[in-house]
Amino acid sequence: MKKLFLFALAALLAFTACNPGTQQNGKHITIAYVNWAEGIAMTQLAKNILEKKGYKVTLKNADVAPVFAAVAGGDADVFLDTWMPVTHQNYMETFAQQVTVLNTNFEGAKIGLVVPDYVTIKSIEELNGAKIKFGGNIVGIDAGAGIMNKAEAAVKEYALDYRLQSSSEAAMMATLKKSIDEKQPVVITGWAPHWMFARYQLRFLEDPKKVFGETEKIQTIANSQFSVSDTVAVNFFRNFRLNSEQLGSLMGALADADGKEDAAVNDWIGKNEQLVKEWE
């Protein structure tokens, strides 16, 4: 735990060196986010709605460790992509006194190892027997992400003779697309909700040891001081939630936005006016 705290503290120093702190006075909100599809989608949506309410919204992008440290330290106000009870448990325990859970914005999330449906193996236990086919590689995302920590644990728990490759979500998805286009076996660190499941035929490998846990929930957390300082914004975040169909359509719209994210979000809002009204 001490190691995690020191890592997050060092990351926070880098975060704040590049990003001026949040102005807590006035109608100003800083939302921190990681480059994960569902978090980007929810963050862009929240930003659009809050700006229509007259807020100046600043977005701060970083890896997950500095994001948690920034929210805890007040350099960011809100983070919409906290996965519990497994993925981000260590971060939540580390910063428990400095952050407040505002709500659960998505139910039924899941993490694990994911393969295309044409792959014949069904379980993580079968990976060693198919090492040559997969090249002995599991393609992951950014180091320090909760799913990567769990993937490392799975490699140990199942005694996998595999290398867990760190990369970005974009690089992982590029590898997945190339493998599917060529009908080659590939195993990635995957999670749902994600637009990849709408675009490709994929499935999670069975995890009999439950290293990746059961289904998870995605929560909105805030700096504890912010959570009592702006009633209007906090009430919005407490009401902000999406189901699988709603978040899936939002992620899909942004994935196909081709640089026109604001237009895609506005179009989504127009198609979901009643839902958005329920958050206000």
Image (tube, helix red, strand yellow):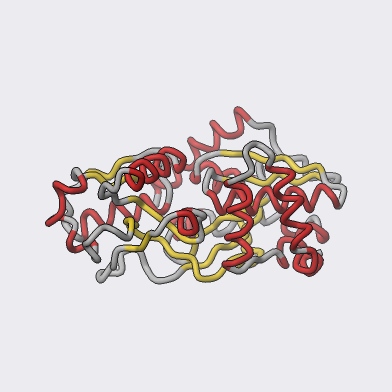
Expressed as whole percent of the image width and height from the top left, the position of residue 23 reads 77, 40
Task: Please tell me which residue lies in front, 28 or 214.
Answer: 214
Expressed as whole percent of the image width and height from the top left, the position of residue 202 reads 38, 59
Which quadrant does the C terminus fall into? bottom right
Residue 235 visible in image: no
Q: Quadrant of residue 257?
A: top right
Expressed as whole percent of the image width and height from the top left, the position of residue 227 reads 72, 58
Vertical placement of 156 versus 122: above or below?
above
**Horizontal relation, residue 251 to residue 274: left or right:** left
**Horizontal relation, residue 32 to residue 119: left or right:** right
Residue 83 visible in image: yes
Expressed as whole percent of the image width and height from the top left, the position of residue 146 reads 42, 53
Could you tell me which residue is drawn at 66 percent across and 50 percent down?
Answer: 43
**Horizontal relation, residue 210 to residue 82: left or right:** left
Could you tell me which residue is drawn at 24 percent across and 66 percent down?
Answer: 122
How many discs appear?
0
Task: Please tell me which residue lies in front, 238 or 197.
Answer: 197
Could you tell me which residue is drawn at 19 percent across and 43 percent down?
Answer: 135
Vertical placement of 110 versus 145: above or below?
below
Q: Quadrant of residue 258?
A: top right
Q: Quadrant of residue 230?
A: bottom right
Task: Please tell me which residue lies in front, 259 or 142.
Answer: 259
